Amino acid sequence: MARRTLIAGNWKMNGLGADGVALARDVAAGASKVAAELLVCPPATLLARVAAALAGSAVNAGGQDCHGKAGGAHTGDVSAEMLADAGATYVILGHSERRTDHGESDAMVRAKAEAAWRAGLAAIVCIGETLAEREAGRTLGVLETQLKGSVPAGATAARLVIAYEPVWAIGTGKTPTTAEVDAAHRHIRSVLGGLMPGADAVRILYGGSMKPSNAGELLAIADVDGGLIGGASLKAADFLAIAAAA
Ligand code: PEP
């Protein structure tokens, strides 16, 4: 099953106007040289400006979170419809920083994924074990629980992407071994097979300290269909080098 590699940048809470737009323009300028699909996910404040800067290029824009409801009395929140209106085609959901900082549960992530689909966005659902869970030998069980709780019924490969992000690898410079990534991704695909038809076509990204120097090895793993990139997505040259390694 051919799956087009997706390299997604998660800018997190980084970027003010001119610099964010310049970063998006630099990514767009290099996009024609890589075969992978490229996506940048700026903070919500920059989404419309970044989407406008990317117009006409092959690079997509996405959000980093959305509320489950389309609108209403939810101060500070952003709906999936608002993201789509601002130019997003994807949204990252259930990132471990959201799960930790905002207490997001699997059920909340599932509701957000349903909201994303309602608004026509593809959902990038993040899952991953903590260091304590890995050391206790619970990694595959944790991934299975998170997948079953976070992925709504009605998933299709066009509107669902999974990001496997070991919590202990995010922003730390540490990465699992290729054998550990391989085992996690194969398990994720097998669990997905029980949740939806066509799981072979779903893209499963690896995220956690991916950088130009390790991207080739990680992206060569059979069930790794791309990367979710944090720190290294803030420099266009590094982000594009990761994409070129795919
Ligand atoms: C992330 O936060 O999604 C991530 C993968 O971060 P980093 O690449 O900085 O580890």
Image: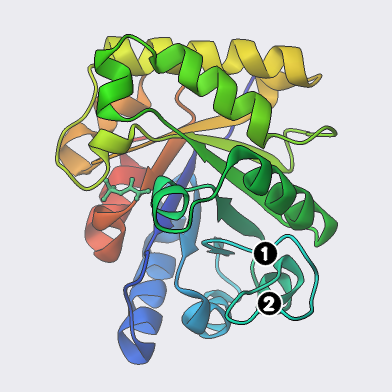
Label 1: which residue?
Answer: 67
Question: On the image, which quarter does residue 218 sit in?
Answer: top left
- Between the residue at mark 1 and the residue at mark 2, the CA separation in whole angstroms equals 8 Å
Question: On the image, which quarter does residue 193 sit in?
Answer: top right
Q: Is residue 83 left or right of 36 when viewed as pictured? A: right
Q: Nearer the viewer, mark 1 or mark 2?
A: 2
Q: Which comes sooner in the sequence, label 1 or label 2?
A: 1
Q: Type of residue at label 1?
A: His
Q: Is residue 130 above or below residue 23?
A: above
Q: Is residue 147 left or right of 218 when viewed as pictured? A: right
Can see residue 212? yes
Q: Where in the figure is residue 59, as x and y percent of width and height?
A: 53, 62
Q: Is mark 2 within 8 Å of ligand 1?
A: no
Label 2: which residue?
Answer: 74
Q: Type of residue at label 2?
A: His
> Which residue corresponds to the image point at 66% horizontal and 30% vertical from the top-left?
149
Task: Name, please, the residue furthest toward the bottom.
Answer: 18
